[in-house]
Image (spheres, rainbow, N blue to C red):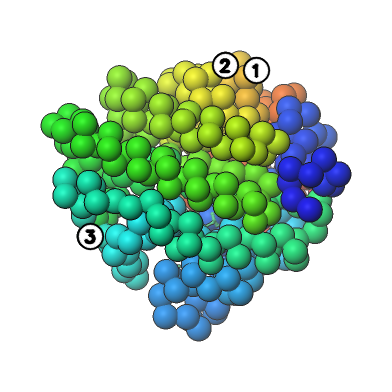
Amino acid sequence: MNAQDPSYPSSAMSKALAGEICPHPPIWLMRQAGRYLPEYRALRATTGSFLDLCLNPAKAAEITLQPIHRFNFDAAIVFSDILMVPYAFGQALSFVEGEGPRLDPVDAESIARLDIDPVRQRLSPVFETITRVRDDLAADKALIGFCGAPWTVATYMIAGRGTPDQKPARLMATRTPALLQTLMDRIVDASVISLLGQIEAGANVVQIFDSWAGILNDEDFDRWSIAPTKTIIDRVRSAAPAVPIIGFPKGAGLRLERYAAATGVNAIGIDWTVPVDFARDRLQPVATIQGNLDPLVLVTGGIALDDAVDRIVSTLRDGPFIFNLGHGIVPETPIAHVEQLVARVRGN
Ligand code: CP3
């Protein structure tokens, strides 16, 4: 039984994603499985590299469930990475401790050679992780699958790493847009294979992370963020119409409105810079809102945390809403602050 089965039990997440207003919003946190958890660090120490962990379904499934066991969140998100798509193309990938991802940068020749054939097979450990988690997860919890938006994935494939402003990809967008388009088309194909594989394996919801959407100029935002995201959504919907899709174009600001209308996402993730009354007035009429506590306020805790949570919840609770952070939880976050947050959101 999977999310497309009409008899599948409904979760608070699926209700909020269908546009229902919940007495207390469902809550999960981006990067909820990660280094702030001692049980994650302990398991991480038993495995060679972060990539090995993503490719080990038994361990990845255990890590996915760790934050559910500890905090009883309403959703689990599969432990994997958006850079599994370049990995699936055969691009060399590693993660340097304390620094981040490293890939062999793509060029015109390697872009022309990108081959979609091995992608499904190379992603099979991720699909197996999802099947394992879904088997162990309570029926009233949602399981979220994900991919990176093509623009964000392309920025890492082109630079070979994270940079402060992803200049190499922006230069390709202006110097050789046709080459970037070829790369984006291949990433779209691989992302559809990835999301449909995750859905088939048991994911109930999928999220598309466009972490670098905010650095695009206004015209490029339509071409490189909205358009490929919409293609992915249309293709996933035609094969799996019942599965809700969350879009998270970080830094999109005023363009969130255009993104929500043009892509047709069921829910839109908002980062912590987005005014919540703008989200309520301009976005919530067309999509469920997901967000948007500043991850550093969660590090601070105390009254500052309670006040920030109350402001967000009181503004957004009269429409469809999922509580989350405005970006990933940071490693120095105290566990007690996460407990305080969950209790506050649930009114306990
Ligand atoms: O949210 C979750 O708990 C699920 C797992 C998840 C990871 N990465 C695990 C991870 C998800 C959804 C991602 C998404 C991801 N990965 C994004 C989009 C969201 C965002 O944060 O903007 C991006 C841009 C990446 C690429 C990536 N992976 C970077 C830049 C880094 C290094 C920075 C860092 O936080 O270390 C990673 C590594 C990574 N991905 C870690 C985790 C838990 C840390 C690896 C470790 O444990 O050493």
Tag 1 residue: 285
Name the foreground residue: 161 vs 108. Answer: 108
Q: Is residue 110 above or below residue 275?
A: below
Dot 1 or dot 3: first in sequence order is 3
Q: Give how far across and how far down residue 314 sits, in percent.
A: 70, 29
At horizontal 63% and vertical 30% (from top left) the residue drawn is 266
The answer to whether marks 2 and 1 mark residues whose Cβ atoms lie closer than 8 Å is: yes
Badge 1 local density, few (<14 within 10 Å), some, or many (20+)? few
Q: Give me the C-alpha separation between circle 2 and circle 1.
A: 7 Å
The disc placed on residue 104 is 3
Badge 2 local density, few (<14 within 10 Å), some, or many (20+)? some
Residue 194 visible in the snapshot: yes
Question: Could you tell me the amino acid type at mark 3?
Answer: Asp
Q: Secondary structure at mark 2?
A: helix
Badge 3 local density, few (<14 within 10 Å), some, or many (20+)? some
Name the foreground residue: 214 vs 222. Answer: 222
Q: Is residue 345 above or below residue 54?
A: above
Position of 18 with respect to 290 (left or right) is right
Q: Give me the C-alpha separation between circle 3 and circle 2.
A: 41 Å
